Image (cartoon, rainbow, N blue to C red):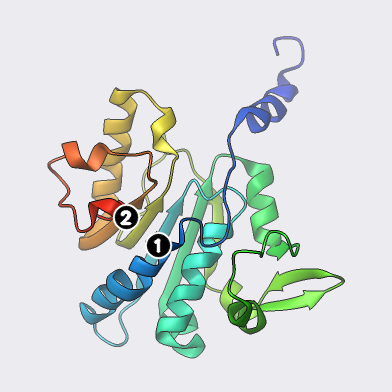
Amino acid sequence: LEVHPDEFVDLFNTILINVTTFFRDPQAWEYIASEIIPQILASKQATTPVRVWSAGCASGEETYTIAILLAEALGIEEYTARVKVFGTDVDVDALNYARQANYNSKELQSVPPELVDKYFEQVNGRYLVQKELRRSVIFGRHDLVHDAPISKIDLLICRNAIMYFNTETQAKILARFHFALNNNGFPLLGKAEMLFSRNHSYTSVDFRERVS
């Protein structure tokens, strides 16, 4: 790396763990769809924006999952008018893949067939996320430790990302998440992350699904 510093990015992207799928842990997404999204929408005026942050989004499957659920709840016209979904990661290659919004049939195995038909277009044997859905999704590089958080967030999704940091860094990231969220906003964690039970800034809504 000292001799070839340009190889650092390749090494960094190689050691990152980018495990993600559409509708991973279906029970969590069912809870988000049936309980959390209705609460978020009920707390807002009909024209007020809805802002979601998918932190550590990797190749974008979970980011598009929440976009689909919001489009289902609002209808595609209101979704495009009101919703912004921010997908962030430190892996530039994964972000580029997410921006293409182009997945193979294996990657879509966990998406209900009716949602595949509704939100994906089949192109050359692959599946492209519908343009109207993509329009409200913004991907960008973001370092959870060093970069300022996105603000005014209603739902923050960060699953199995902060568990790789030490305790001090985890606390720092949680504080940034707390700053990012609206007063009535919700964070969704991965099942391996239990920190919210020990953080007095958050109140657990459904600990089994790691929603606070």
Q: Earlier in the sequence, mark 2 or mark 1?
A: 1
Instruction: Tell me the SS state at disc 2.
Output: helix
Q: Amino acid at mark 2?
A: Glu
> Which residue position is annotated with label 1?
27
| Picture layout, residue 70 above or below residue 101 | below
Which residue is at the far top? 2
Q: Quadrant of the C terminus?
A: bottom left
> Which residue position is annotated with label 2?
209
Q: Quadrant of the N terminus?
A: top right
Front one among 5 and 33: 33
- Mark 2 and mark 1: span between their CA atoms? 7 Å
Q: Quadrant of residue 104?
A: bottom right
Is residue 131 shown left or right of residue 55? right
Is residue 74 shown left or right of residue 18? left
Front one among 205 and 131: 205
* Residue drawn at point x = 71 percent, y = 61 percent: 100
